[in-house]
Image (cartoon, rainbow, N blue to C red):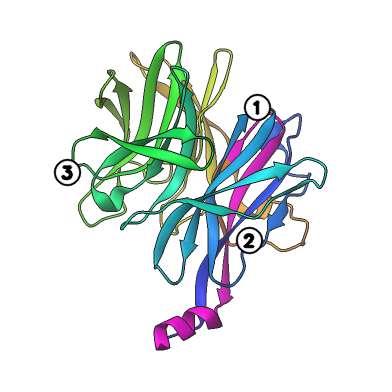
Amino acid sequence: MGLRIETWNIAYRKKADTSFRNTEIPFTVIPNGHRGWYADPFLFDYKDETYLFAEYFSYKLGRGVISVSKYDTEKDKFTDFSEIIKEDYHLSYPVVFSYNNQIYMMPECGESNNLFFYRALDFPNKWEKISVIDKKMRLADTTPFQVGEDLFALALKQKADSADGELVLMKYDGSVFQPVKTITKDMSVARPGGNMIISGDSVIRVAQNCEGDYGRELSFISVKNMESDYQEKVVFKLTPNDISLNNGKTPAGIHTYNSSRNLEVVDLKYYKKSFYRLLLRLF
């Protein structure tokens, strides 16, 4: 019953001209508290405000719930997180996106062997769950994105009782996501690590390296010919050693990158002692 545990922190910074390629401007780390940690950060701009959605892993529950915070431009910091979605199974990777004049969230819920839309009823705090994919499919870190009028998604389709799997491309037909093709089984680039970065004709997907050690690095991969002759090429890699932080520490891992109009966020792995979690185990 050791005290040393793996934890994650979210860090943010003002968006640089070179975006994810900039390794000089430091990130500011958001403190966790003693009852759990935050990871899988996703930003969403809404009515001139920027919101941060994240997994909160609760030591007491032993699983993740979805929380939200708002960026305070005057103080250059995020407000305290508030919990918005909790289920009987683990939730993480809360992708928030707009489609057909609605705001949706598609969190990771592979433990339920299902995939759900959550539709915003009163953004950002109230959400309605809508099932979109039948059971018996375990998908990790599903990442929806829109090209023209079409809604696609990339996800890691996992093997039973294994974190490994294959990256699959799916297309929304108005009711469910239908598989289009398998992209890769290479676990160094198969698991999504954030929203697609789309600018004009440029499409870049973010992948986390899960080969050997969870959260080794992020790859930024240029994508061409989405549905026909799919092609991709790694254009940039971001390692924990590349991350400059306001506290001067070097993280042990990284597995998510996202951005909004003005901000960038990452999550960072650390190892620390947790006396709170030890007390929970004892009592």
Check disc 1 and report its element: helix, strand or loop.
Answer: loop
The answer to if 274 sits in the magenta stretch is: yes
The answer to if 9 sits in the magenta stretch is: no
Q: Where is residue 157 in the image (x, y as percent from the top left)?
A: 28, 41
The kind of residue on which mark 1 rests is: Lys
Residue at the image position 31 percent from the left and 54 percent from the top: 163
Q: Nearer the viewer, residue 15 or 76?
A: 76
Q: Which of marks 1 and 3 is nearer the N terminus?
A: 1
- Which mark identifies residue 136? 3
User: In the displayed image of the protein, which residue is found farthest to the bottom?
Assistant: 282
Name the quadrant of the N terminus: bottom left
Name the quadrant of the C terminus: bottom left
Q: In this view, does 114 lie to the left or right of 246?
A: left
Q: Position of residue 188 (x, y in %)?
A: 42, 45
Q: In this view, does 112 lie to the left or right of 121?
A: left
Tally of marks? 3
The kind of residue on which mark 2 rests is: Pro
Q: Position of residue 122 (x, y in %)?
A: 50, 35
What segment carries the magenta color? 258-283
| Distance between the alpha carbons at the discs numbered 2 and 3 | 36 Å
Residue 178 vertical position relative to residue 126 in the rendered view, above or below? above
Sort mark 1 into few (<14), some (14-19) or many (20+) by Cα contacts within 10 Å: few
Residue 213 vertical position relative to residue 146 in the rendered view, above or below? below
Sort mark 2 into few (<14), some (14-19) or many (20+) by Cα contacts within 10 Å: many
Which residue is the site of mark 1?
47
Residue at the image position 59 percent from the left and 56 percent from the top: 268
Residue at the image position 25 percent from the left and 43 percent from the top: 114
Check disc 3 and report its element: helix, strand or loop.
Answer: loop
Which mark lies nearer to you, 1 or 3?
1
Q: Quadrant of residue 168?
A: top left
- Which mark identifies residue 251? 2
The kind of residue on which mark 3 rests is: Lys
